[in-house]
Image: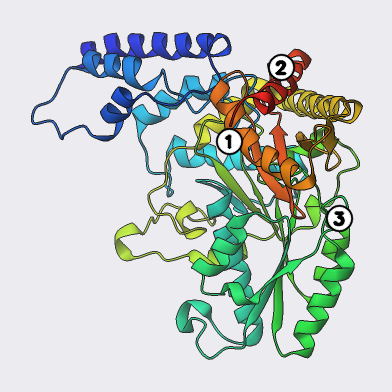
Amino acid sequence: MTDDLRRAGRTAADLAAGHLASVPDGPVWRPVPGADRAWLTDQPLPAAGRPLEDLLADVRDHVLPHPMGNGHPRFFGWVNSPPSPAGVLVAPLAAAMNPSCAGGEHAGALLERTAVRWLAELVGFPHRPGAGLLTSGASMATVIALATARQREGRRQGWDVRETGLYERSPLAMYVSAEGHSCLRKAAELLGLGGRYLRTVPVDGSYRMDTAALRRLVAADVAGGVRPFFVAASAGTVNTGAVDPLGDVAEVAREHGLWFHVDGAYGALGVLGDPGFTGLELADSLALDPHKWLGVPVDCGCVLFGDPAGPRDTFSLVPPYLRDEGADELGWFSEYGPEQTRPFRALRVWATIAHLGREGVARLVRRTCALARTLAAMVEADEEFDLLAPAVTSVVAFRLRPAGLDPREVEELNRRLPAAVQHRGRAFLTGTNLSGTTALRACVLHPDTTEADLTILLEEIRTAARSPS
């Protein structure tokens, strides 16, 4: 079996390298043909096993030809990066070890201490040992942060959420920007806080949280007998890349005893490209995704805390069959979040950061932000396009507005453009809605994207607009 694995491993490595090398010359994305779709979705359970080399042949023929597209330099959709070469390289080694990183004295658990600390140092977040862990992504990081804030609020009011739940307690209000990520609402619903008490804070003309409106909402809840307890600001929204006024939000949080959370899933690393971007260090919790700007292969999120006691009080549960008498004072990672069996995510994070170094990460951030500003300038210089928001990180929100179309026609055109551009295969972008306006959005994350790729993107938008629906 070892010899078979070694031969197949060489084949797999060649397939991976060949795939990555071929991506820039192929289409960004294309629909999956019927035959391959049937193979991917309708295979019967095999009665007998097959050789490893046969499995790799199937992957070569049916899987690798149909990527999501995010490995291509002209993929500008959502916030999905290409994989870092170092992360790709070490992923099979983590799988070969296959540890559970709940805790214990082994490389997988110990290396996570370094990976989390490095992430905190990159974004300037004060890190105490134990005050953070890797997660599946920012959605789970948000659940962990919100649950910790809920537990703290219960303690303050003299009750234990873990013991009594939320029964017969006054409602708790949380505050989220109108541009906040949907994972915040999902977390509130999942944790029993309810969407009814999730307050949407208006944004200003640059799509940043309006802190005066936040103050009014908090005051109204206090007057109405609802307990404010949590506010989430964004460090790089998905729609426009906007960064909320973190210092001002932190001040409101301090005044009213709110837990201050920052969603930096996409944009926290932006601090490396903009020295004026400050305030992350004021947060009680920070969510960030190494699998976004940093390019760590999916899945890999992270949540950081100002104080490790909070998440441990929220999640620690050590039954006799999991007790580790040799554990140090920090205990296990599984005491700080809901996952018990946890994958070896740290190896991909460590390898990616070690390969790039701080300067390499900063260079990537600065380069992609500069390209976004270039795209914004190209949009502003073209009479057929409107720039809809400042380009402050690496996201550009804009729309096509050809002469002679009325507002309804412009809306319909921009609604159908993302799919039309995607199907052409030369570029990929997505759409959104900003203050009732249908928008196009391009997120620049690929280290090999060039200004020529930006020109092609705008050309593809114009061409798709001229094509029949």
Q: Which label sits on residue 456? A: 2
Q: Local crowd at mark 1 within 10 Å, few (<14), some, or many (≥20)? A: many
Residue 119 occupies quadrant: top right
Amino acid residing under circle 2: Ile
Q: Spatial distance from mark 1 to mark 3, Cα to Cα?
A: 25 Å
Residue 311 visible in the displayed image = no
Residue 229: x, y in percent? Answer: 70, 75
Sequence-wise, the earlier of marks 2 and 3 is 3
Residue at left offset 73%, top offset 55%: 179
Which residue in the structure is indicated by mark 3? 245
Residue 379 occupies quadrant: top right
Q: Spatial distance from mark 2 to mark 3, Cα to Cα?
A: 34 Å
> Decide: marks 1, 2 in contact (CB < 8 A)?
no
Horizontally, is 19 left or right of 442 in the view? left
Q: Nearer the viewer, residue 393 or 380?
A: 380
Sequence-wise, the earlier of marks 1 and 2 is 1
Residue 82 visible in the displayed image = yes
**Image quarter (top left, top right, bottom left or bottom right) of the N terminus:** top left
Q: Local crowd at mark 3 within 10 Å, few (<14), some, or many (≥20)? A: some
